[in-house]
Image: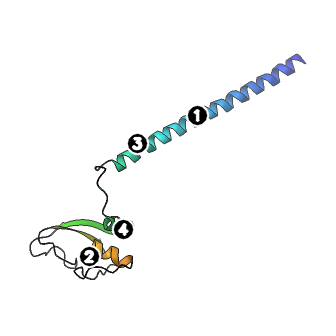
């Protein structure tokens, strides 16, 4: 009878050790996951100064699978044929897909049904 009691107690002890080991492994894995997530998040959002924000038209363009780029226009604005208004040597954000390029703000306004300045030409990129 004594040996049966000892065997049952040993089994319970081993089972408890297994449970504690599994819990410890899970806690360590969770801690590492949270730490790695915190590191990746801080690198992702701290690349710029905290006072800078992304251009909403650029974010919208990229979220819809279009390529966003910034062009630096020459005095005659020849680098972008259908981009809308000309900045005369300034820079402009453009959205491109399948060779069609238009001003990123014109694309943003078009897809969100917002009327926009007449200086921006019609955007031919589908939403």
Residue at 45% in and 44% down: 37
- The secondary structure type at the circle numbered 4 is helix
Residue 104 tag number: none
Distance in Å between CA atoms under marks 3 and 1: 21 Å
Give x and y (percent) for residue 108. Answer: 34, 73
Which residue lies under the disc numbered 3? 39
Which residue lies under the disc numbered 2? 102
Nearest the viewer among 110 and 77 is 110
The crowd level at tag 2 (other Cα within 10 Å; few <14, some 14-19, many 20+) is many
Distance in Å between CA atoms under marks 4 and 3: 26 Å
Apparent side of residue 30 relative to residue 121 in the rendered image (left or right):
right
Give x and y (percent) for residue 5. Answer: 85, 21
Which residue lies under the disc numbered 1? 25
Give x and y (percent) for residue 98. Answer: 30, 75
Apparent side of residue 9 relative to residue 28 in the rendered image (left or right):
right
Identify the image quadrant of the N terminus.
top right
Whichever of callouts 2 and 1 sits on the residue coming sooner in the sequence is 1
- The secondary structure type at the circle numbered 1 is helix
Residue 60 tag number: 4
- The secondary structure type at the circle numbered 3 is helix
Distance in Å between CA atoms under marks 1 and 4: 42 Å
Whichever of callouts 3 and 1 sits on the residue coming sooner in the sequence is 1
- The secondary structure type at the circle numbered 2 is strand
Distance in Å between CA atoms under marks 4 and 2: 13 Å
Q: Is residue 79 visible?
A: yes
Give x and y (percent) for residue 4. Answer: 86, 21
């Amino acid at each position: 009878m004594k040996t049966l009691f000892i065997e049952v107690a040993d089994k319970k002890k081993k089972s408890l050790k297994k449970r504690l080991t599994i819990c410890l492994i899970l806690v360590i894995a969770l801690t590492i996951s949270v730490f790695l997530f915190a590191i990746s998040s801080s690198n992702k959002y701290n690349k710029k100064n905290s006072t800078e924000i992304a251009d909403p038209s650029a974010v919208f363009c990229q979220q819809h699978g279009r390529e966003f780029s910034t062009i630096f226009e020459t005095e005659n604005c020849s680098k972008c044929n259908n981009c809308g208004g000309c900045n005369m040597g300034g820079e402009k954000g453009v959205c491109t897909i399948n060779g069609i390029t238009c001003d990123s703000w014109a694309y943003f306004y078009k897809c969100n049904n917002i009327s926009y300045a007449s200086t921006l030409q019609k955007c031919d990129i589908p939403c």
